[in-house]
Amino acid sequence: MSARLSAAFAKGHPALVCFVTAGDPSPAATPAILDALVAGGADVIELGMPFTDPMADGPAIQAANLRALGAGTTTADILAIARDFRARHADVPLVLMGYANPMITRGADWFADAAAAAGVDGVICVDIPPEEDGELGPALRDRGISPIRLATPTTDAARFPAVLDGSSGFLYYVSVAGITGKQSAALASIEDAVARFKRTTDLPIVVGFGVRTPEQAGPIARVADGVVVGSAIVDLVAAHGAQAAEPVRALVAALAQAVHQARSVAA
Amino acid sequence: MTAQTPNSFRNQPDERGHFGQFGGRYVAETLMPLILDLETEYRKAKADPEFQAQFDDLLEHYVGRPSPLYFAPRLTEELGGAQVWFKRDELNHTGAHKINNCIGQILLAMRMGKTRIIAETGAGQHGVATATVCARFGLPCVIYMGATDVERQQPNVFRMKLLGAEVIPVQAGAKTLKDAMNEALRDWVANVHDTFYIIGTAAGPHPYPELVRDFQSVIGREARAQMLSRTGRLPDILVAAIGGGSNAIGLFHPFLDDPTVRMLGVEAAGYGLDKDHAASLAGGRPGILHGNKTYLLQDDDGQIIEGHSISAGLDYPGIGPEHAWLKEMGRVDYTSVTDVEALDAFQLLCRTEGIIPALEPAHAIAAVKKIAPTLPKDTIILANLCGRGDKDIFTVAGHLGVTL
């Protein structure tokens, strides 16, 4: 797996993973927003690939998908955004997150080649479970790109090894059974789940879905290897459009402080 | 045949839910444990004579099966060629074939201890059928329906509400069937512990395409036995309209290994295949959406393109994966019919047989109208009359310039 991803989880503090949708509000506006994530202290960037039918997403990210597609964002634009990001930020890991159809539509090999050429470190595909790994997983692994899988509250012990098999980079724990941006899970249930998964894997475990504020992110970072924030950032992009970079940077800086210092603050 | 002929066309899908390269289980991880449970429970139910007996009993006494097999003498005479017969599934309780599947799935839901039912609907026929079985068994029911479809299918929205269902208009996307399905999936991932999703067509993640087909296959099993008993032989050509494809696969599947029986699936060509339409086999290519790999209307980047058809029930940019496989195997032929052709066929059946068809089977009738005159009089065409047209009279009146 990518050295950049390993390094992101070896900094001696929990990682802040930040999600934005590529092309929202326009392909031209995305680079400045990505730079704001880095400037604010994000350790891993998740770049969402917009799709017409984002079935696992709540209203905030659905709307971001539609804004991006409405602005004419294409797969070529997304790959260019990734490639340019890599040129500006040699060490910050970049993960593409999205749905299967745009990823496989020209063939898994085409997508994996293009992602590798753009300097992408990992891919999260929401609707390719381990049972359908052959669709995309082998092509990614052949090129050293980490297929990052999701585990959820419904992923039991019997199923967990299948989720781990063939995945790398980190494990994304979806802390609520539901869609993005909605309610958040109780801390105790997150702690239990992370402890349960830690018995079986050495992969870093990152927790997301419903995490919006530094006050929520800090306590989760005490029990997990990283925290994902998506909808709260996407909401700022929705509110500020092409001027979103500064408010995004400010939110990410507050989140990064809470996450990075979570374990040095007295529990 | 375009591919090597298998020993049987009736032994799909494989153990992983694939029909050749199609089908599968492309869902978010939250849903995987549930659909694996569903598969296990469906296998048990299928082997349980008590489950089958309960299903058969409800189909007979509640739905009104078997539906008649009807020879259409005046339509046959008007077309001047092959004999036209209809499988009368529009006479079912609730007015369409959709109820067959809903009976099967609600029995499965109760077997699995689920206490809440959700469904998506386009034209509203599946929503009405789902609301009906929920009322029959006393389970709460939530129906997702695109806001555009809510507007154009008001009578069915009112029916669902009378039956006690909550109808949620979906404002996302083009506000039609595809968006309703997205929203139903979002509900399901948030409520997996107590909720069963009754999918209305032979699509979605495995095991849905298989179980919907099995429940709808009562159409073809009855038709085969009825035709043999009435004429002493099998039909020559089966014809059925295709949106997702559940009435068509229900009619076709029991005949797939009868080599003399040809089959024709009829997609919605909307304004024409070079304009907006809903013919995913004719105008799409393979991709992944709503849990399965199948033919989809999509652009070069894999973004889904909205379907268009005069028939809200055919207005979907995908098709059940078994049809995608049957097309590639060359076992079933697929054609398409425009809005205008379907409207003509709708009126033709009203006039010649005193039957007002739904706009969905009007597409099948339009295809029959094209092929029957070219065939000898001893050829038997059997078309599936999968729904009645009461729900469509406002749409048809609008297109004919009549104000009701």
Image (cartoon, coloured by chain):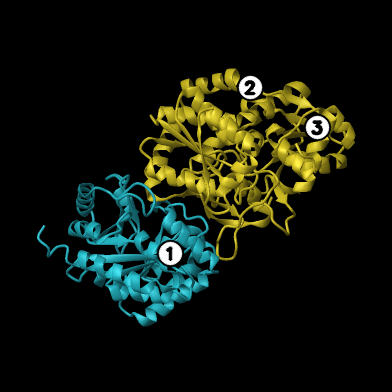
* The hue in which chain A appears in the rendered picture of the protein: cyan
Please report, as a chain letter, where disc 2 is located.
B
Q: Position of residue B46 (x, y in %)?
A: 48, 29
CA distance separating discs 3 and 2: 23 Å
Nearest the eye: B296 or B324: B296
Mark 2: secondary structure: loop
Can you say whether B376 is above or below B92 in the image? below
Q: Is residue A38 left or right of residue B100?
A: left
> Chain B takes which shade in the image?
yellow
Image mark for residue B148: none
Secondary structure of the residue carrying numbered label 3 = helix
Q: Name which of mark 3 and mark 2 comes first in the sequence.
A: 2
Q: Is residue B102 visible?
A: no
> Would residue A196 be seen by someone viewing this image from the given angle?
yes
| Residue B350, numbered label | 3
Residue B66 sits in which quadrant? top right
Between A166 and B232, the one lying in front of the other is A166
Comparing labels 3 and 1, the label whose residue is closer to the camera: 1
Q: Are marks 3 and 1 on the same chain?
A: no
Q: Amino acid at mark 2?
A: Arg
Which disc, if any, is residue A238? 1
